[in-house]
Image (cartoon, rainbow, N blue to C red):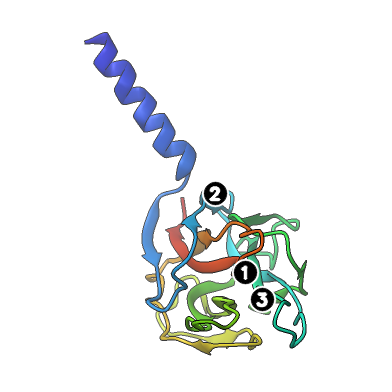
Amino acid sequence: MCRVLLLFSLVVCACYATFPRRIGRTLRVSNGGRWGKWQAPSFCPNGQFASGYKLKIEQRQGSLSWEDDTSLNGIELVCGTRNTASGNGYTVSSGYSHWGSWKGLITCGSAGKFLTAFSLQVESKQGNGDDTAANYVKFECRNLNSVSRSHSIGDDGFWGSYGAWSMSCAKGSAICGLRTKLEIPQGSGDDTALNDVEFYCCGSD
């Protein structure tokens, strides 16, 4: 009996360590890249939600056949509270690759507005050409207790096209964490880095 209780406690602790917040909805899109493995999720602190984001992007490498582009390498969420646009600069990210650099912060623009839905720009499989998979991501912002979508933020990457928007977080919730799908460096092969992402909606804990 003690062994069973101990095993149950370990399972509960492991789950809590991986998902420290109560998730109301997981946001996904259907056009993510095919390569890589899902990385460990990461979350804003309790009471905070994603009010903006940064992207880690490798610039174009050129047109020669041996130059390998990866484009989007990482996504970082900037967390904020209902009363501040950012929670003292607290940021969270899942796995990301080493190419490129973090680009300027894009935010919802005012306190109380948070990321609630997303769309992913992905380049389709190129056959014998250079694959890059995910290139950029854009979001929709909304007041936490509103049901109508407010406005979208984001830009366009180098290659590929945007797919359909994900579901939106329910009223009273917003994006609070993420998990990325990342291909490890391929050595002499074709690198794609970040392929896909899913975001988690949380309510007020």
Callout 3: helix, strand or loop? loop
Q: Which amino acid does label 1 sit on?
A: Ser
Q: Which amino acid does label 2 sit on?
A: Asn
Where does residue 190 sit, x and y in percent of width and height?
Answer: 60, 70
Q: Which of marks 2 and 1 is nearer the N terminus?
A: 2
Q: Name the residue under label 1.
A: 51
Labelled disc at residue 46: 2
Spatial CA span between label 3 and label 1:
24 Å
Viewer-side label of 3, 1: 3
The residue lying at 46 percent from left, 48 percent from top is: 21
The residue lying at 69 percent from left, 75 percent from top is: 68
Callout 2: helix, strand or loop? loop
The residue lying at 49 percent from left, 82 percent from top is: 127
Residue 50 lies left or right of residue 145; in this view the side is right
Mark 2 Cα shell of 10 Å, populated few (<14), some (14-19), many (≥20): some
- Figure check: 183 above or below 124: above
Q: Which of marks 2 and 3 is nearer the N terminus?
A: 2
- Contact check, label 3 and label 1, Cβ < 8 Å: no
- Figure check: 63 above or below 203: below
